[in-house]
Image (cartoon, grey):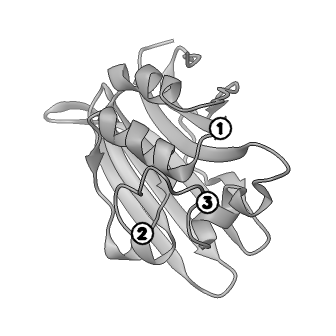
Amino acid sequence: MTIQVAGEGTEVHAIRSDATIGEIHRAVVRSAARRLTGDADEAVGLELAVLDVEGIDAMIRAQTGADVTVPEWLGIPVRWHRVAAGPASMILVRSWPMITELGPRAVVEYKVVTSDGGAAHRELLLVPGQAVVLVPGAASWPADPELQEPPSSPTAAAMGWSHRRSEAVIGMILLVPRFEPL
C-alpha cells in the first residue's frame, strides 16, 4: 500500500484517515510496534513506536478510510522538514544515513514545537528494516477502542484533529529509512 522510493534516505508518509484514535492505536499495537514514548512526548500528546517495515501495510489497512499519499523524500541532506502543522504547534523531522562498525544505520530525529514553549525532541538510531510511527496520544496507551478523538494536545492540533469534522486527519506519520543504493 505504501509507495517505496529507491535510494538512500528516508521517506515520510503522512497517513490521512477517517479512523478513530482508538482504531489507530489498535492498528499500531497489532503491528507489533515497540512503544518508545517518553515523558516529554506524553507532555505534547505524542505516541512514538518503532516497527518492522513488513508490518506497515497491515497497520495502514487496519484503519478505516486510510489514504496513503505520495511520500516526501528527505534524502540525505540534514535539514528539518515540517511534516504537520497547526495554528500553535508543528512536527519537524530530519534523518540521515550513517555507517557504524555494526553496519548501516539511519539517524531519525523528530521534534514537536509549540508556540507556548513546549517541546518534545528525540533522536533514534534505526537498523535497516525498521520504521518510526508517530500518532496522537490519549490518556492511556492504547486508547480505548471507543475513543473517537485524542485529547486536545499540540500533536493532535498539528495533525489536524481540531478540524476532524471537515476533513480526514493525519492519523499517523511514518518515517521509513531506505538503505538501497541508487
Query: Which residue is more in the foreground, 117 or 100?
Result: 117
SS class of the residue under badge 3? strand
Q: Residue furthest left?
A: 102
The image shows residue 47 at horizontal and vertical percentages of 42, 58
Q: Is residue 153 visible?
A: yes
Residue shown at the point (56%, 63%) measured from the top left: 150
- Residue under circle 2? 41
- Residue under circle 3? 91
Q: Type of residue at label 2?
A: Asp
Residue shown at the point (68%, 71%) measured from the top left: 89
SS class of the residue under badge 1? strand
C-alpha span from label 2 to label 3 = 12 Å
Q: Is residue 157 left or right of residue 133?
A: right
For marks 1 and 3, the one nearer the N-term is 1
Q: Is residue 146 left or right of residue 39?
A: right
Q: Type of residue at label 1?
A: Ser
Residue shown at the point (79%, 58%) measured from the top left: 163
User: Please, is residue 126 above or below residue 92 in the view?
Assistant: above
Q: Quadrant of residue 69?
A: top right
Q: Is residue 74 visible?
A: no
Quarter of the image containing the N terminus? top right
For marks 2 and 3, the one nearer the N-term is 2
Nearer the camera: disc 1 or disc 3: 1
Q: Residue furthest bottom?
A: 116
- Near mark 2 (Cα within 10 A), the count class, few <14, some 14-19 or many ≥20, is many
Q: Type of residue at label 3?
A: Ile
User: Please, is residue 91 above or below residue 29 in the view?
Assistant: below
Q: Is residue 91 left or right of residue 25?
A: right
Residue 17, which numbered label? Answer: 1
Q: Quadrant of residue 19?
A: top right
Query: Which residue is more in the foreground, 39 or 8?
Result: 39
Residue shown at the point (26%, 35%) measured from the top left: 32
